[in-house]
Amino acid sequence: MSRRNDTLGDSLGNSLGNSLGVVGLGGSVLAFACMPRVSATLVIDDTKAPEADNAKDESEPKPREASNLRGPMDLVRAEQISATKLRLQFSNPLGPLDGFDPNDFRISVLKVYSDHDEGGSRDYGYYYDFGYLGYGQALRFTAAQAGEVELDLQFTPGVDPYYCRWLESDYSYGAPGVEAVHGLFLHYAAGAIPVRDVAGNQLRNFGADWVLEGRADPPQTRRDLDGARARLAGQGLIPIACGPELPPGPR
């Protein structure tokens, strides 16, 4: 019975298909040919689709709002990334820095020694200006460029990043019986326009006296430390990391 019906359907379909000028559709045309005619109106929507440039990309990261910030404004990392540039990274997005003086920051080379012998121990050390070694002048920041949470500071005179690594090796090969702390450290004293985050939280001062002495005329380029001052040196300061090592080969 099923085969007979299929044959009948194909026969009718081919007959109708030929009469309508449609060949090879078989029984599938039957349903189409038997559909009642309905008047239709073609509606064209002339509303323009939004341009790609104006469309919102929901996948893009949204800026952090001031109300979402938690905790104080802190400097979490400092790194020398070239002979003339220092990069700072903050815990919160930076607020406006128009008129900010980059020399509210200052770099020190800190060397502290604890010499232990039979007669007791002696602590001594010193700060000196990063630009003073081999240049005889205080280092100055000349420009600042801010990102969301980063601040790049340009300085002069330039100091080869090798010197930062030399300090690390000098620390590694200290004299027997002498504990040493060597490194580059960052100091900060807020000026007329302090560093703030987008919520208005102000960056705290750290090592401010070295910054203030750098503003003197002439600026202090070295300070000797002994006893308790040497033992406390470096506390609360931000150590400056050495940038990526340069690849081997000619310069």
Image (spheres, rainbow, N blue to C red):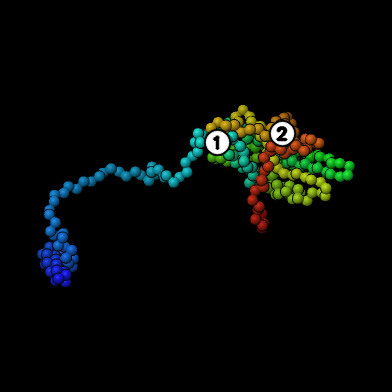
Q: Is residue 76 left or right of residue 180?
A: left
| x and y percentages locating residue 223 in the rendered image | 77, 35
**Where's the N terminus, which quadrant?**
bottom left
Q: Looking at the picture, does residue 1 appear above or below residue 184? A: below
- Label 1: how many residues lie within 10 Å, few (<14), some (14-19) or many (20+)? few
- Label 2: how many residues lie within 10 Å, few (<14), some (14-19) or many (20+)? many
The kind of residue tagged 1 is Arg
* 2 or 185: nearer the viewer: 2
Residue under the image location 67 percent in, 47 percent down: 242
Residue under the image location 65 percent in, 53 percent down: 246
- Label annotation for residue 70: 1
Secondary structure state at the residue bearing disc 1 = loop
The reply to whether residue 162 is in sight is yes
Q: Looking at the picture, does residue 210 appear above or below residue 22? A: above
| x and y percentages locating residue 50 in the rendered image | 34, 43
Residue identifier under label 2:
210
Q: Distance from label 2 to label 1 (Cα)?
A: 30 Å
Q: Quadrant of residue 210?
A: top right
* 121 or 103: nearer the viewer: 121
Residue under the image location 32 percent in, 44 percent down: 49
| x and y percentages locating residue 46 in the rendered image | 26, 44
Asked if the residue under mark 1 is in contact with the one under mark 2, i.e. CB atoms within 8 Å, the reply is no
**Where's the C terminus, which quadrant?**
bottom right
